[in-house]
Image (cartoon, rainbow, N blue to C red):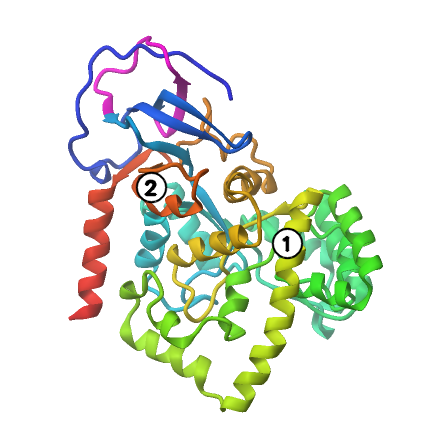
Amino acid sequence: MKYCYLLLLCLFSLVGNSQSLKKADRSYVFRGVNVVDVASGSIVSNTNVLVSNGKIVAVGRHKPKFPKGTVVLDAKGKFIMPGMYDMHAHFPNVDGEPFPVDEYLLLNLSRGITSLRIMRGAPVVLEWKQKIQNEEVIGPSLFVGSPALVVDEKLQQQALRPLLAGYQRQGYDFIKYLGGNNQGVYDSINHIAQQIGLKVAGHGPPMGLEAAVNAGQSSVEHIEPFIGLYLYDSTRYAAAMTRFVEKKLWSCPDLYWYQIYGYQIPKPQLLASPGIEYVPKEMVARWEKELYAIDSTTLKRKYDAYALRVNTYKKLLPRKDKQGVNLLVSPGDGVFVIPGYSYFEEMKLFAQCGISNAHILEACTSNAARYFGEDNRGRIEANQPADIVLLDANPLLDIANTTMISGVMVRGRWFSKKELDEKLAAIKKKYTN
C-alpha cells in the first residue's frame, strides 16, 4: 500500500447532510482508522485517510495540512475497506425484478455496494448511468452490458462489427452474450469485441466451457459450463481450467441463485431473508407463488438435481481459487434475491466453501475493478475514487463483519449509518403500513 502523510491541525465531528451537496466537493478525514489492505489480506492500523473532491488524496499516519473545512470522522477502532462490486446485477424494470429504482440503488448502497455490473443493458439503463455520474441521482456506479446477444437466425445474417461498434459508441461497457448454437458466429463476436476493445461476458456457449476458453470470453457466468465439463470429463475440465487461468478469464458463479431456485433453502428461511422487510408484500407473495407453484414430486426432483450440481460446484470453487481463477461475486437476480442484502449470502457461501476472507474481499473489490481494467479502483490508496465502506469490526476475522456498516462513501459522498438507517426505515414503513 502506498502512503502519503497528512497533518491533522483541528478535529471536529461530522455535521450536516452530505446529500445536500450537488457535487462531492467536501473533504473528509477518517481519523485513526484501521485500513483493510485487500491485496495483501492485512490490516494497517491507526491510519488517517483523507478524501477530497471525490478521491482519496492521502493515506498515512503522519500529520501535514488538509483543506479548510474538512470534516473529521473519528474512526478509531473501526475498519475501512473499498466499496464492493455486485458483478451480476439486472436493472429493475428492464430485465430485473420490479423494484423502484431509487430503492434498488439505496438498498445496494446501504450494504456497501458502490458499483453494479448490469448484465443486460438498454438505453434507459445508460440514462441512469449518466444520471448517477452527473450526481443527479445517488447510487452505485453502473457498468452496463449491451442488449443481450442470442445467436439466432437474425443475428447470423447481421454484420457483427458495426453492431458491436455501435454498442460501444452508445456507451455500453461490455458485450452480453446470452446463447445460441453457432460456434462460428460466437467466435466472431469474441474476436471482433477483442479487436475493438470490448469484453464479452455472459453464459457459457452451448458448445461448452472449452469453446468459451478458446474464444477468450472474458467472464463466464453461472456454474453450468464448469459442472457440465467436469461431470463429463474431469481430465478435460482440468486442462480447460489451466487455460482459463493462463488467459486471465473470470468466473462469476451466482451460487446463491442456485440455492434459491434449486430449493436448497427451506421456504420459511427464504420468507425471513435478510432485507425482506424492504420488499413490497405483493412482490414477496408473487415470488412465493412463482417458486412453489409445483407439486411435491417435481420439487423433490428439482431439489435432487440441483443438490448434485451445487454440491459438486462447492467442491470445485475452492480449487478454482487455489488455481488462481479470477473470481467475481454476485448473488444473481431473481425471486428472493434482495438488492444488497443477498450479496452477503453469496459471500457467506464462498466462506463455507473454504475460501479465505481475504480472497473473498479481494474478489468483491480490487478483483472486480481489474476486470474493467481499472487499476485506480478497488483499494484504499491515494488517487483512488472515494468508494469506501466503514465497518465496526474486522472483516478479515469474520466475513459477517462486512454487514456491520458504520457508513458508506460513494464517489466522495458520505452517508452515515444513521442516515442510511433513516432511509431504510422509510422504505420499511412504506411496505408495512
Looking at the rendered structure, the secondary structure element under dot 1 is helix
Q: Which mark is residue 317?
A: 1
- Badge 1 density bin: few <14, some 14–19, many ≥20, Cα 10 Å: many
Three-letter code, disc 2: Glu
Q: Please name the residue shown 48% across and 67% down the image.
A: 95
Quadrant in the picture for residue 72: top left
Closer to the chain start, of discs 2 and 1, is 2
State whether residue 377 is above or below residue 45.
below
Quick check: 81 left or right of 375? left
Mark sitting on residue 135? 2
Q: Which mark is residue 247?
A: none
Please give the name of the residue rendered at 52% of the width and 30% of the height, measured from the top-left corner: 376
**Residue 316 versus residue 397 in the image, above or below:** below
Mark 2 residue element: loop
On the rendered image, what quadrant is the C terminus found in?
bottom left
Q: Nearer the viewer, residue 144 or 154?
A: 144
Give the extent of the magenta segment. Answer: 52-72
Q: Is residue 141 visible?
A: no
Say few, some or many: other residues with alpha carbon within 10 Å of mark 2 (under 14 / 14 to 19 / 20 or more). Answer: some
Residue 24 appears at what percent x and percent y? Answer: 31, 32
Q: Taking 55 as reference, is 333 left or right?
A: right
In the image, what residue occupies the spot 35% across and 12% down? 6
The residue at the point 75 percent across, 57 percent down is 212
Q: Position of residue 363 (x, y in %)?
A: 55, 43
